[in-house]
Amino acid sequence: MDNNLEKNFEQFYIDFYPRIYAFLCRLSGNSDLSEDLTQETFYQAYISFHKFKGDSDIFTWLAAIAKYTYFKYLKKNRMDLNTVCLDSIADVYCSGDSESPEEIFQRQQVITGVKRIISKIPEKYRNVVILRIYAEIPFSQIASVLGITENSAKVIYFRAKKMLMEELNDEYNM
């Protein structure tokens, strides 16, 4: 790798490390594992940097590598996507400051319900929800990461959200 490309990659690393780390931390729920996976993601990006054509946003490209790295880790360690930490997703849907013990208990019940519902939805729905909520990336980039159309990403996300809200409404009258 020439010196100019190394300098560019160094800046690229500095710019994107926090977002990729946060994305992986939310997926795994483990900061130490996320750090290792982030390093592996950037290592894979470094060896493939010359292949990046610029057809997509650079973060989309990196998020795809990070997702692949995480799924490879799960497969290698004989885990499935049901082991994904869903606390952060549940927190997004149940955010708010609870003050009374009753509100805290009720919020915990909803969080448990959200985690259960998300863990039961098909993988394609779960992946889109995770990418949309955790990485906060647009549907066009989600489509690129998952190899689907942008319209499919939108439809899948809204169907997953509808499933989640219907289940929550049935159980908790939300």
Image: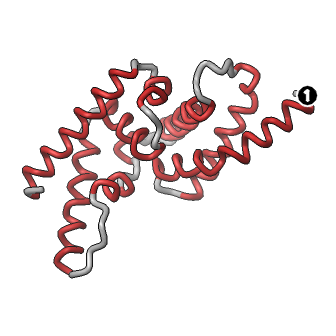
Label 1 amino acid? Answer: Asp
Q: Give the quarter of the image for residue 95.
A: bottom left
**Image location (x, y in percent) of residue 45:** 69, 32
Which color scheme does this rendered protein use? Answer: secondary structure
**Which residue is drawn at the image coordinates 58% and 47% (left, top)?**
19
**Which residue is drawn at the image coordinates 91% and 28% (left, top)?**
2
Where is 102 relative to 7, above or below? below
5 left or right of 62 in image: right
CA neighbours of label 1 inside 10 A, class few (<14), some (14 to 19), many (20+): few
**Which residue is drawn at the image coordinates 28% and 54% (left, top)?**
93
Task: Look at mark 1 in the image and give the residue it sits on.
Answer: 2
39 left or right of 136 in image: right
The quarter in which the N terminus is drawn is top right
**Image location (x, y in percent) of residue 38:** 63, 45
**Which residue is drawn at the image coordinates 69% and 45% (left, top)?**
15
The quarter in which the C terminus is drawn is bottom left
**Image location (x, y in percent) of residue 20:** 59, 45
Judging depth in this view, the residue of 119 and 114 nearest the camera is 114
Judging depth in this view, the residue of 120 and 100 nearest the camera is 100
Residue furthest out toward the bottom: 100
43 left or right of 113 in image: right
63 left or right of 14 in image: left
Query: Which structural element holds mark 1?
Result: loop
Judging depth in this view, the residue of 104 and 137 nearest the camera is 137
